Image: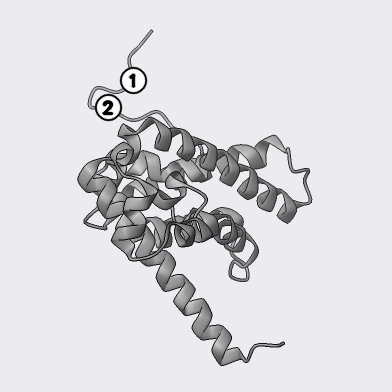
């Protein structure tokens, strides 16, 4: 039976709200008690859902930490394919990073979240696998725009550099300026920094 659009919309909103509530409860428990000391059952109880509901929305504990990861590939592809008329790929990716990462970096729990990931081996490993998947996705999207093979080295390198921008910028005081600087390096090539005494002679 075909479901009316309004009912379908309510169902999707309810599903999204449940997923968000589970992820929020999980992050709160992880930050309070440490990732390894929190169980799926404890997360389910905190979110007032069953453990089956948790697994219906998430594949495991790691996925609860990276709850936005599922849609990241879609957003990366859209940044390349749905860019403004006349906008080149690199400028579109610069705008995408500024629009999506800066609000995350400004979140009051960002530092705690980042420490949780870096201090937990299972989460670090998951993040590395996730980063590799996103690199493949973004590289393929870039290659498609230029009619290149998906294993084209230039497209793969650009994808890696772009995904690394937040990592390079996160320790800087001015996140926006750091993102802009790294993208300028990608666009224009690296130049030696000009120190107070100039380059050392060899």
Q: Are marks 1 and 2 in contact (CB under 8 Å)?
A: yes
Is residue 176 depicted above or below 151 in this figure?
below
Relative placement, left or right, of 150 versus 120 is right
Question: How far across and down, in percent of the image, does residue 153 sit?
Answer: 68, 35
Asked if one can make out residue 101 in the rendered structure from this viewpoint, the answer is: yes
Which residue is more in the foreground, 129 or 27? Answer: 27
- Label 1 vs label 2: CA separation? 7 Å
Please say if 7 is above or below 150: below
Residue 91 visible at all: no
The image quadrant that residue 47 belongs to is bottom left
Q: Nearer the viewer, residue 50 or 36?
A: 50
Query: Tag 2, which secondary structure?
Result: loop
> Which disc is residue 183 wearing?
none
Secondary structure, mark 1, is: loop
The residue lying at 67 percent from left, 53 percent from top is 141
Q: Within 10 angstroms of label 2, few (less than 14), some, or many (20 or more) residues?
A: few
- Residue reaching furthest top? 202
Q: Residue 163 vs residue 169: left or right?
A: right
Q: Which residue is mark 1?
A: 199
The residue at 46%/40% (across/down) is: 164
| Residue at mark 2 | 195
Would you identify the image quadrant in which residue 46 lies? bottom left
Displayed quadrant of residue 78: bottom right
**Considering only vertical position in the picture, is 27 above or below 156?**
below
The percent coordinates of residue 180 (x first, y second) are 39, 50
């Amino acid at each position: 039976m075909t479901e009316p659009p309004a009912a379908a919309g309510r169902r999707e909103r309810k599903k999204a709200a449940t997923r968000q509530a589970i992820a929020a409860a999980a992050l709160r428990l992880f930050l309070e008690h440490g990732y390894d000391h929190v169980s799926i059952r404890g997360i389910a109880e905190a979110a007032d859902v069953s453990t089956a509901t948790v697994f219906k929305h998430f594949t495991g504990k790691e996925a609860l930490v990276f709850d936005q990861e599922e849609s990241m590939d879609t957003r990366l592809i859209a940044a390349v394919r749905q860019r403004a008329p006349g906008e080149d790929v690199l400028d579109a990716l610069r705008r995408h990073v500024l629009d999506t990462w800066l609000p995350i970096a400004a979140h009051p729990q960002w530092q705690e979240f980042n420490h949780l990931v870096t201090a937990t081996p299972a989460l670090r490993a998951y993040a590395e696998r996730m980063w590799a998947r996103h690199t493949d996705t973004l590289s393929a999207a870039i290659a498609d725009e230029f009619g290149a093979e998906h294993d084209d080295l230039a497209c793969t390198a650009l994808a890696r550099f772009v995904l690394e921008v937040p990592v390079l910028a996160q320790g800087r005081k001015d996140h926006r300026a750091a993102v802009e600087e790294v993208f300028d390096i990608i666009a224009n090539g690296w130049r030696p920094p000009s120190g107070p005494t100039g380059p050392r002679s060899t």
